[in-house]
Image (spheres, rainbow, N blue to C red):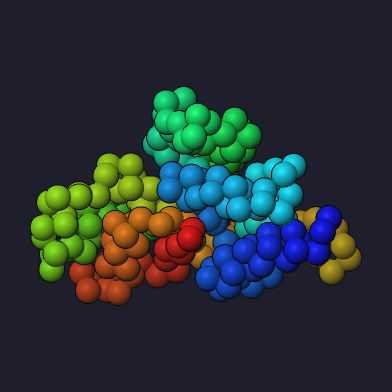
Amino acid sequence: MKANEKDFMEGRIEKLLKRMNYEQGKKVLVFLDTGAIIDAEEELAKYKLYNSGAQIEKIYNSLLGRGLNLFVISPVFGEVLSHHNCNKVNGRAEISKQNFEIVSNLQSAYENFLQNIKNNDKDEIDAVRRDVYWASVFAFEEDKKKGERDPISHVDRELISSAAWARYAHVPFYSKNANGGIETVVQKPDEVIVLSPDSHVEKTITMMSINQLGLNYEGIRTVSSR
């Protein structure tokens, strides 16, 4: 591997981790939106300027290898499937086969996560969806024209709802004990991040977390994928 190749990719990953305020050992769930998955393709195109044989797996593995839990919910996966099958960029699928296969695995990981939830001391998911709806309305109250011209999508609302609900779920995490063995600890995640370039997502989550509407969803935030 050439030095500039390594520096480029590691540099991009380190910048992303810095935006995430990454701390080793924290239990963090990262939900990907469709825009972030498409952004991974653009990162790969830049990476290939240094290494024509570069693979998109390196981007995802760099995050998974640091203990981050990456999830894709079913509505986002549906959008990814459409982009993979129907959208072309310079004659190639907008979302490559390799990227699509990784995302499919991340969607399976989310389904497994749902099955392993032990209990949830926050409101049920429908109540969270109502909170997300009103947060999305008030998030664009000062810019109603944008809210009407470019409204938040159902998929974005469902993504935010899933992430917000997961923040309060008790789930098993695996970590090494003092003797080097693997033990299971059931706890809430320390933080939930939605990786997205979308202002609808960012503004809605901000509205939910600043307690302006009396919602006070702590420990969930948006990180830009760009």
Question: For the point 51% across and 65% down, which residue is it?
Answer: 191
In the image, is residue 38 above or below residue 182? above
Tell me if residue 97 can be seen: yes
Q: Considering only vertical position in the picture, is 7 above or below 113? A: below
x, y percentage for residue 212? 22, 74
> Which x, y percent locates residue 41?
55, 45
Tally of marks:
0
- Quadrant of the snapshot with the N terminus: bottom right
Kindly give the residue lying farthest to the top in the view shown: 85
Residue at x 30%, y 53% (from the top left corner): 128
Q: Position of residue 112 (x, y in %)?
A: 58, 38
Q: Position of residue 110 (x, y in %)?
A: 54, 42
Q: Residue at x 43, y 55 (%)?
A: 196
Q: Which residue is more in the foreground, 34 or 88?
A: 88
Q: Is residue 158 left or right of residue 116?
A: left
Q: Is residue 215 left or right of residue 29?
A: left
Instruction: Work out which residue is located at the far right of the displayed protein and give it.
Output: 179
Which residue is more in the foreground, 116 or 57?
57
Is residue 81 visible to the viewer in this orientation of the structure? no
- Is 146 left or right of 45, judged from the image as shown? left
Image quadrant of residue 86?
Answer: top left
Question: Quarter-wise, where is residue 56 in the image?
Answer: top right
Left or right: residue 216 compared with residue 190 = left
- Residue 215 versus residue 186: which sits nearer the camera? 215
- Name above or below for residue 101 compared with residue 13: above
